[in-house]
Amino acid sequence: MLWRLNASLTETEARQLGWTALWRSTREHLLLTVTAAVIVLVIAVPLGIALTRRPLRRLSPVITGVANTGQAAPAIGLFVLLATWLGFGFRTTVVALVVYAALPVLRNTLVGIQGVDPRLVEAGRGMGMSAAAVLFRVELPLAVPVVLAGVRTALVLLVGTATLATFIDGGGLGVLINTGITLSLDSLLVSGAVLVALLALAVDWLGRVVEHVARPKGL
Amino acid sequence: MSETSTPDTSTPDTSTSDTSTSHTAPARRVSGVSIRLDGVTKRYPGQDRPAVDDVDLEIPAGETVMFVGPSGCGKTTLLKMLNRLIEPSGGRIHLGDEDVTDQDPDQLRRRIGYVIQAGGLFPHMTVATNVGLVPRMLGWDKRRTAARVEELLDLVGLDPAVYRDRYPRELSGGQQQRVGVARALAADPPVLLMDEPFGAVDPVTRQRLQDELLRIQEELGKTIVFVTHDFDEAVKLGDRIVVFDVGARVVQYDTPERILAEPAEEYVADFVGAGATLKQLTLTRVSDVELQQVATATVGADSARAVAAARAAGHDFVVVLDERGRPVSWPTLAELSRTTTVPATVDQRLPVVGLRSTLNDALDAMLAASQGGVVVTGRRDALAGVLKVESVMAAIQRSRAEGAGGPSPPRPRRWTPRSRRPRAPTRRRPGPDAAPGAPSPSSRCWSPSACSPSCCGG
């Protein structure tokens, strides 16, 4: 794929395709993705767990509803709205990405834990495990595959959505694509898009590997 | 080495022929404690009738008490209140002399074994981890836990070396259930609660598991509370049976024999199908009837000598035992004489029942294998003898004769209206008129040897 970059004649404006610039954009893009992903994990997984506990169980439709709106809103609109409120830049981009990607993780955490056979939970309680022990030794391990699938979806979603960061000055590979579109520079546009796609595929593959390794044996 | 052994049929189990034998056997070891319920009630908000209404019940130490009743009658709710998976709304629960109603439920549950359908094993843990869970929670060290796991797997008839490191999905349903029982027994709790544990396995496996449970209970003498909807299972396993009606109302609490002979109410009679002639088959144990002594040979012994010894003793087949004395096949003398040493092949279709199995089970096993007899095993699956279909028929004849003029005749009114006996056994088996000698599905195979041509193929 990359030979194409060297083969095609670089136009004056295509300075951005220089190795250092390219590397910088890719790094920015990854940084956005990873930061947002970590924040999503820290917020959505515990929230998902909390929503399956008895005192909060009745709240779960409300929260999933909110998360749903987060995702149903057009991403670009979300970015711009947040930018007018929080200002332009990296931080706003991360906030927007988190809002956008929280849903799959939250919902898969909920579904994963709710999908654990209630008889197993009862068996655990019945043999004298505390509620916390049942959560950490039975429910969470059994929910791991579903939760990780959600995380993988969120990551791929993040890689794609992070291209929009360029509109609110968040950097990333979106800059390439945007410049390509506005200046009709196809090589810029295509290479930006291809890089994003490759990144998404790589992230997805990595996610699969993690899933494979983290999946409890015996399932 | 081969010998014509006379299996020891004079164990305490077999020496008596009275149907209530071991329920009251004085030598039985008891490691359980009694359970006493005082006015236990469970009310759910929004329901006008309590699910469990003011139940008083006393369960003696070391006995197996079966809870039976229609679904929704509250028997499972009552069971779960014993280990407080469901908190009672009122009443007191005593374990032995201890009032446990206000104890920390987690601590309480570690002292009460709990078995549910399909074992409730955790699929992401190995057999050993599953069984070792409670001991680890109780703070046992690794070595002690491992030793205990080994002991328990052996107790439930699974070879530890083979099964310890397997995951539940690599086990059959019956094996999972055995592991479930082993897990419940892990910390040697005095009380075992079983919630329809054998409901999800096929009939043959269920019969084996029931035999296994009887054997384990014989060894351990726990207090077992067992919920089932299968009355035959209740009769087979229970020292006593509690029949419940809606709201967990105790309709009758008595031994199986007395419930069948004298149902307290019309309701019980209908529920248990009392008066059904062949019900006696579930009350009579294999150990209560006479077993045939057979010629045996150990795997790897000289075939010719085994054949000669069997022939001298007048037998036309030999039961082959493995090195631990467990029967593996029963070749005819003709088959055996074609081999030089006694083969180790395990006959998968060999019909086997335990000494504590009912005649009902034995007959089932014979029909399933199309054989005229079954091999009977005793402690640790060692051979106890062979039960032939003639003996079963004779026992039926005897019990019918007793029923006609004996001390506890089935009440006559239960005999006439067929429609009032909805729970009479429906499975096909030789009817009450199939006297010995009369043609019946299994009469082709009167002698086991005559119809085991395929076993341990020569």
Image: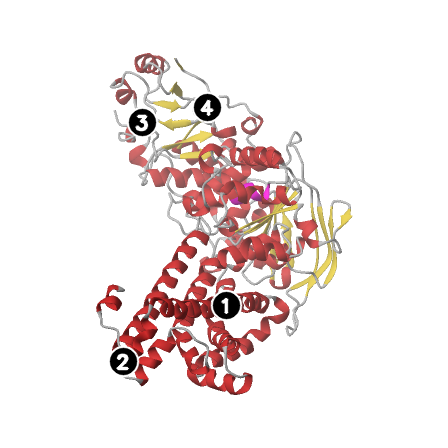
Residue B292 seen in render? yes
CA–CA distance between discs 3 and 2? 91 Å
Residue ID for mark 2: A185
- Mark 4 is surrounded, within 10 Å at the Cα level, by few (under 14), some (14 to 19) or many (20 or more) other residues, namely few
Question: Which numbered disc flags the more N-terminal residue, 2 or 1?
Answer: 1
Mark 4 or mark 2, which is nearer to you? 2
Magenta-tinted stretch: B180-185
Q: Nearer the viewer, mark 2 or mark 1?
A: 2
Residue type beneath disc 4: Arg
The location of residue B52, given as percent across then percent down, is 66, 62
For the residue pair B387 and B298, the one nearer the viewer reads as: B298
Query: What type is the residue that disc 1 sits on?
Result: Thr
Residue A144 in the image: above or below residue B395: below
- In the rendered image of this protein, does residue A190 appear above or below residue B359? below
- Secondary structure found at label 3: helix
- Relative to the observer, which residue lies in front, B6 or A162? A162
A48 with respect to B364 (left or right): right
Residue that label 1 marks: A35
Residue B449 badge:
3
Residue B246: which quarter of the image? bottom right
Would residue A135 be found to the left or right of residue B84 on screen?
Answer: left
Residue B285 part of the magenta segment: no
Residue hosting label 4: B324
Q: CA distance from mark 2 to mark 1?
A: 30 Å
Secondary structure beneath label 1: helix
Q: How far apart are labels 3 and 4 at the CA level? A: 23 Å
Can you tell which quarter of the image residue B310 is in? top left
Residue furthest front as drawn: A12
**Camera-nearest residue between A34 and B382:** A34
> Cα distance, mark 4 to mark 2?
84 Å
Q: Is residue A202 left or right of residue B159?
A: left
